[in-house]
Amino acid sequence: MSKGERATASERLPAIRFNVNGESRIVNAPPMKRLLDVLREDLQLTGTKEGCGEGECGSCSVRMNGELVNSCLVPVLQADGADIQTVEGLALCGELHPLQKAFLEHGGAQCGICTPGMLMAAAQLLEQNPHPGIVQIREALAGNLCRCTGFIRIFESVAAAISPENAGLAKESTSGQLRAEKEQPPHAR
Amino acid sequence: MSTPAKTRVVGAAVPRKEGVEKLTGRACYVDDMEREGMWHGATVRSGIPRGLIRSITFDRRIDWGEFAIVTAADIPGENCIQLIVADQPCLADGKVNHCEEAILLLAHPDKHKLREAVGAVKVEYEPLPAIFTIEESERQDVIVWGADNLLKTFLLEKGDVDSAWARAAHIVEGEYRTGAQEHLYIENQGMIAEYSAKSGVTVWGSLQCPYYVFKALRPVFDLPEDKIRVIQTETGGAFGGKEDYPSIIACHAALLAMKSGHAVKMVYDRMEDLAATTKRHPSRVHHRTALDRDGKLLAMEIDLATDGGAYATLSSTVLSRATLHSTGPYLCPNIRVRATSWATNYIPYGAFRGFGAPQAIFATERHMDEIAATLGIDPVELRRRNFLHVGDTNATEQVMREPVILDQLLDRALKESDYHAKRAQFARDNPNNPVKRGLGIAAFYHGSGFTGSGEVYLNSLAGIDVTPEGKVRVLASNTEFGQGTNTVLTQVAAESLGIDYADVIMASPDTGIVPNSGPTVASRTSMVVGRIIERAASQLLTLLREHAGLGAIYTQAEFLAACDRYRETHGEVVSLCRYEAPPGIVWDDQKYHGEAYGAYAWAVYVAQVAVDTVTYSAEVEDFWAVQEVGRVIHPVMAAGQVEGGIAQGIGYALYEKVVWQDGRMANNQMTNYIMPTAQDVPPIHVYFEQIPFRYGGFGAKGIGELPHDGPAPAILNAIRDATGIAFNAIPLLPEDLYAGLAATEEMAAQ
C-alpha cells in the first residue's frame, strides 16, 4: 500500500477528539483501536506501556475523566470527548511531580516498565484520598503488577509523596499493624 | 572484623542513574522504538511436542506476496543458536522437539496483518512419542536427546559417605520437588533488527548480555565480528529470562530484516512470551543424611535431578550451581552429590535468578527441619550446631578463608523477628484458632560470580574513558534491567576518580562501543565488574599523574584539564583493565573440587505464615531477611533487590504454577499465572551486616540472586510449624494444602 492510499484510508476513519495531558487532540483511528495503541502509535506517547493486553498488569494505566483505566481495554471511541492524563502529563513545566520525586528518592522504580502505570494509580489514589494509610495504598496499587521491587519501596514512595515523615510508614509496619488497620472500620482510618 | 572505609559516593543513596527517564516515561524500551520503513515480524510455531514436519502449506486467501517469509533454508550460516552445546536450531528443519518451537518467520509492514497470516500457515506433522517428566526421561524408553536423554551429570564427593551410615545415630531421608517458574518480567521480549550487505546485522533489544547475542548472530549469518552490532535498549525486567532467549529473537528478527530488506521489529505479546520462552528448571532432590547423637552431620547423600527441556541451553551450568549449593552452609565431613539434568519435550528451561540454587536450597532447608523433627531438636539449634565457620571446608573442600558470621546473622534474625516469643505464643493460640500461625527459618549461602574458573575464562575487559566533550564514561557491557548496574558502576567510578557522581555516565550498552566485560548474570556485576572499574579508575589517575601533571589533590576542573592534556599527547583518554582472579583460586572442573566461588553471600531468613484451615489459604504475614553481602554500595537499591527477590520467592512457594497440557503451557496469561500483588506481599524487614570483601568492587559481594534462595523453604518450614504437616513440594497451592490437611485429619480419625 502506498503512502497516498494510506492517507486516504486514514482520512476515512472517524475523528476522535479528546484532551490529552491538557492539550486537545484529534486522531483518525478505527473506533475499536485500543486507547493504548492510539496513545503510543498515533500520539507517540510511549510512556504508557503494554504488559499483558488483558487488563491484569496495569502497566497501561492512564487516567480518563478522573478514573483510572487500563488503556489496553478501552476502545478509543469510548475516549471521544474525554480528558486523559498519561505519565507524560505528570511533570509540569519540567518540574517532577511529588510522586516522581518520591519514587526517585525511595527506590520506587527499578526496571521502570510498570512505573508509568504505577504512578498513575498512585496519582489517582492521592487525588481521591490525600492521606491514605498503608492498607489503602496497598488496595489502590493492587491492580498494578511490579516484578522487581516486591512493592515495599513503592508503598514507601507513595507514603513519602504525602509527607516526608510518612516515608517509614510502609517499611516499618508489621503484620500486627497491618491487621489492626485492616480491621478498623473505614471511617476510622 | 574490618569496617567499611569512609566514602563519599559508595554507600550513599544517590539517585538512580536513569531514574528520571523512567519516571517521566521518556526511557526508550524496544517497543517504543521505530526505524524508518520498519516492518513487523511474527513466528509460526510448533503445535506439537515432538514430531517430523511433513508439509507446510500457505492458505491461498492471504496475499503472501506482501510478506517476507523465512525458513531454515534462508539461513546463510549455521542453523544453530550458539550457547554451550550446539544442539538448538534457530528454526526447526524437518523436526520439532517441543511445542512453540519456531518453524517459520513472517514479516509485513502492518503488524495487524500478522496474526491472521500466522494462523494461515498450516504445518502437518508425523508425531513422535514425547516425554514430560524426569522419570520418563530417566527410564530411557524413549530417547529424545543425544544417546541417553542425559543433558549433563556431575558427581561431587568429599570424605567417605559409604562408611558413615554404620556409625550414624540417626538416618533421615526425604524427597523434595520444585516446579517451573516463569520470570514474568513486565516487559515482554522483543528485538528490532536491520541488515545491509555493507554494515551487516544491527539489533536493538531487550536483553541482559549483548555479547551473548553477538556470539549467536555471527554463525547464523556467517559474518565477521565487525559486521555484527548489538545494542541493548532499556530493559523492563529480566531475572535471567533475558540471558539466553534474546539470542533467538535477535536471529529471527535479523533473518527477516535480511529477507525483507527492511528494519523488522519482533515484540512478543504476553501469551507468546509465556508459552515460548524459558522458565526455571523443575527439580527433584532426594536427601539421605546421617547424624550423630548430638545432631551433627556425619554424611549427606544427595541425588539431584532437573528437567532441562528439549535442548541443552544452560542446563549444565544451572545444574552445576544447584550441585554446589545442595549441601547448604553446613559442615559435613562426608558428602556425595549425584546430579543429573534430563531432556524432555518441554520448551528449554533456562536461567532464572538463583540459577539452580533456589531448587537445591529448598530441598536442603526443608530437609533440615525434617531432621530437626526426627531428632526432636529445635530447627534453630540443629542449624547452629552444623554451621560452617572460618577454617572449615564446604562440599568442594574449599576452605572458608573469609569471615563467616552465620551465628551472628541467626541471632539477629531471631531477635528482629522475636522468634522464640512468637513461636511460644503461636503454640498457645493455634489449638483454638482455625487460622494456624507458624515461623520458619532458612539459612543459606550464595556463591557470587561465575563458578570455578568461569571468571578466568570470561576474562572480562572493562574500564573508563573521558570524551573530548568532557564526559566521563564507564565502559562495560553489563546492562541495566532494574537491578542498578548503571548506578552502582558509575558510583564506583565517581568514588575512585574523586569526581561527582552526576558527572559520570554509562557508555551506551552497544557492542560497537563497549568492551566485553562478561554477561550480566550470576550476581557478578558489583563484585567482579565493580572491581575492574575500580582498578581502571586508579590506573587512569596514575596515567594522568605521570603524563598529564595531575596533582595529588585536584578539583573536578583540574581533573578534566589533565584529561585534555593527556588527550593532546596520547590521542584518547581511556583506561581498560582485565579481570584478575583473587589469589588461591584453584578449581578442578573434573573432580568438582576446590574454590567453587571467590566469595559467598550469607543469609538467614525468617517467615511468619498464617494458614487458614477453613479456606486453605496460606499467607506470608511478615518476613525478616538478614544478610551479609560484603559492602553495600547503594543501601536503597540493595534493600530493593532483597525485597523484590523475596516477593518472587513467595510467588515461587505459594502462587506461581506453570500448568502443562500435552507439553504446552496452558495458563500462559497473567489472568491465570498468578504472581504476588501489592495486596499479597508482607512487610519485609531487611538487615545488612557489612564485611567488605577485599577482591570485590569497594568490598561488594553478589546480592541479586541471594534473596530468591531463602523464602520458599522458610515459608514451607513455617507452614510445617503452623500445621505440623511436612509439605515437600512447591508451588504449594490451596488445593495442595487441602490435600495435606485432609489426609492428616483422615489419619487422625483412624
Image (cartoon, rainbow, N blue to C red):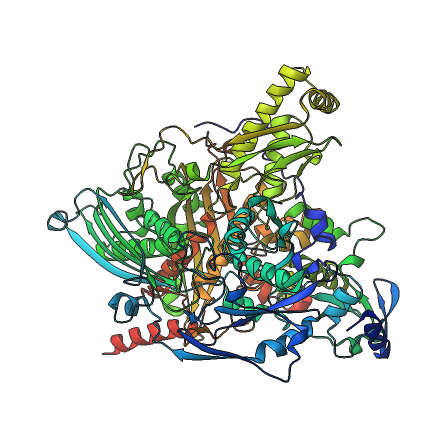
Quadrant of image for the C terminus of chain B: bottom left
Q: Residue at x 74, y 53 (%)?
A: B26
Query: Percent from the top left, x then y, of residue B111?
Result: 68, 71
Residue B188 can be seen, yes or no: no
Q: Residue at x 77, y 75 (%)?
A: A76
Q: Is residue B685 above or below residue B549?
A: below
How many numbered tags mark residues here?
0
Query: Percent from the top left, x then y, of residue A5?
Result: 82, 75
User: Given the current orientation, which residue lies at the most extreme right position?
Assistant: A24
Q: Horizontal placement of B271 versus B732: left or right? A: right
In front of the other: B680 or B48:
B48
Q: Is residue B401 above or below residue B607?
A: above
Query: Percent from the top left, x then y, of residue B558?
Result: 73, 20
User: Given the current orientation, which residue lies at the most extreme left position?
Assistant: B166
In front of the other: B90 or B211:
B90
Query: Percent from the top left, x then y, of residue B481?
Result: 59, 50
In front of the other: B202 or B634:
B202
When asked about the image quadrant of residue B587, the answer is top left
Q: Is residue B443 above or below residue B256?
A: above
Quadrant of image for the N terminus of chain B: top left
